[in-house]
Amino acid sequence: MQSKETPQITTLFWRNFECELCKYAYPYLFKTNNRVYKLVDIKTPANSQNFIVMESLALEKNSSRTIHVMAFSDEHSQFTMGRGHESQVRVNDISVSRTHALIRYRKDEGIYLSDNKSKFGTLILMRKASEQLKKG
């Protein structure tokens, strides 16, 4: 597993964990004997309550996984996302525009995602139904 970190963004890269014999992908979280184990430990920002964790979906089997952890503060309330080198959150996928979207945090309002007129639009899949991301 590799890690790349700037003061507000931590990016983790790793290849899928799988059985060498049957090629079945292992889950990243599993439970045995009433204990929960993580194959990958994702550190959340210690000094910020306002952060978001984004995972790039792997479309190909046996491809690498990417996790972005973004911490918002008064000095860094927004991040650019895209496949271009100028983007703060890099997504290496041909269907992602060079400057695809903007992720903003507004105090007392939440996190907003603004599509930057990308060709294919922006798809958001959320893990918890109670969490909301506002269109901006």
Image (tube, rainbow, N blue to C red):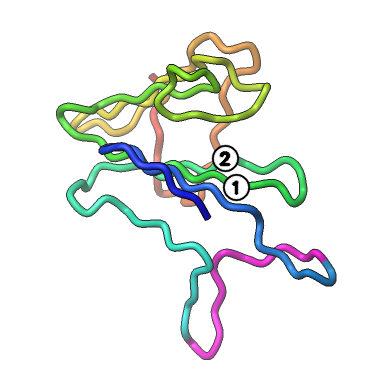
Which quadrant of the structure image shows residue 41? bottom left
Question: Which residue is the site of mark 1?
Answer: 65
Q: Is residue 46 above or below residue 27?
A: above
> Where is residue 1 shown, x and y percent of the image?
53, 55
Q: Residue, x 17% and y 49% (percent of image)?
A: 47
Q: Helix, strand or loop at disc 1?
A: strand
Q: CA distance from mark 1 to mark 2?
A: 7 Å
The structure residue drawn at horizontal position 57% and vertical position 40%, both measured from the top left corner, is 56
**Labelled pair 1, 2 in contact (Cβ < 8 Å):** yes
Closest to the observer, 54 or 8: 8
Q: Tell me where residue 77 appears, x and y as whole percent.
A: 24, 27
Q: Foreground mark, 1 or 2?
A: 1
The answer to whether residue 45 is above or below residue 86 is below
Q: Type of residue at label 1?
A: Arg
What secondary structure is found at the residue carrying circle 2? strand
Taking the spot 40% from the left edge, 34% from the top edge, the residue there is 133
Instruction: Say which quadrant the C terminus sits in.
Output: top left
Residue 20 among those drawn in magenta: no
Q: What range of the chain is rendered magenta?
A: 23-34
The kind of residue on which mark 2 rests is Ser
Q: In the rendered image, which residue does mark 2 sit on?
A: 56
Q: Residue at x 55, y 30 (%)?
A: 91
- What secondary structure do most residues of the magenta stretch adopt? loop
